[in-house]
Amino acid sequence: MSLEVTLTKLVPLDHQLLLITQDDLTHRRVFDPAHRSHVPNFGCVIKSEIHGKIKHFAISRQAVLFCVERRKAWRMLQSKAGIVNKDYLLQKDLLAKLDKGEVSAAEVKEKGAPTPG
């Protein structure tokens, strides 16, 4: 299997994070393949520039879950400082659309968040 084929099957980390809440971690939904928040091990990809070239790296499930934990901590700090996190509001709106069936998890994994409006 070529590297290009493998990369197309991987979900960009920022797209996957849109589908996961802290509650999904708490209730272990991230391990359920039927749930929108499912995170396959080494199923997400990040891009990095190394010596002027863009490289792609598959990351572990644990790394993705760590990102969710850190995001929760960051949002909590912002909340205590009185800062409204616009990304959180957009994520809540997106998850509501997913629950209503207006958008699918597969679409979000492929394209990211739909543009508001």
Image (tube, rainbow, N blue to C red):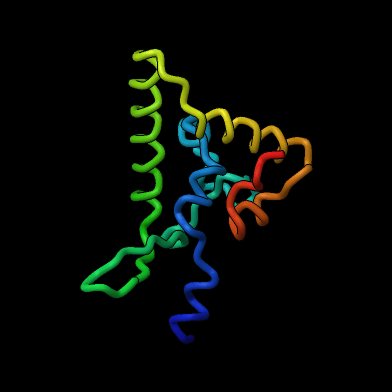
Along the viewing direction, whichever of 103 and 64 lies nearer the viewer: 103
Q: Residue 112: x and y, percent?
A: 58, 52
With respect to residue 25, does 46 lie above or below?
below
Which residue appears at 52% of the width and 80% of the height? Answer: 5
User: Among all residues in the image, which is located at the extreme bottom?
Assistant: 1
Along the viewing direction, whichever of 32 and 98 lies nearer the viewer: 98
Location of residue 13 (image quadrant): bottom left
Along the viewing direction, whichever of 101 and 14 lies nearer the viewer: 14
With respect to residue 83, does 71 lie above or below?
below
With respect to residue 63, does 41 lie above or below?
below
Q: Is residue 35 left or right of residue 73?
A: right
With respect to residue 5, does 28 lie above or below?
above
Which residue appears at 54% of the width and 43% of the height? Answer: 18
Q: Residue 70: x and y, percent?
A: 33, 35
Instruction: State the quadrant of the C terminus.
Output: top right
Q: Residue 25: x and y, percent?
A: 46, 36
User: Among all residues in the image, which is located at the extreme right?
Assistant: 101
Which residue appears at 61% of the width and 60% of the height? Answer: 110
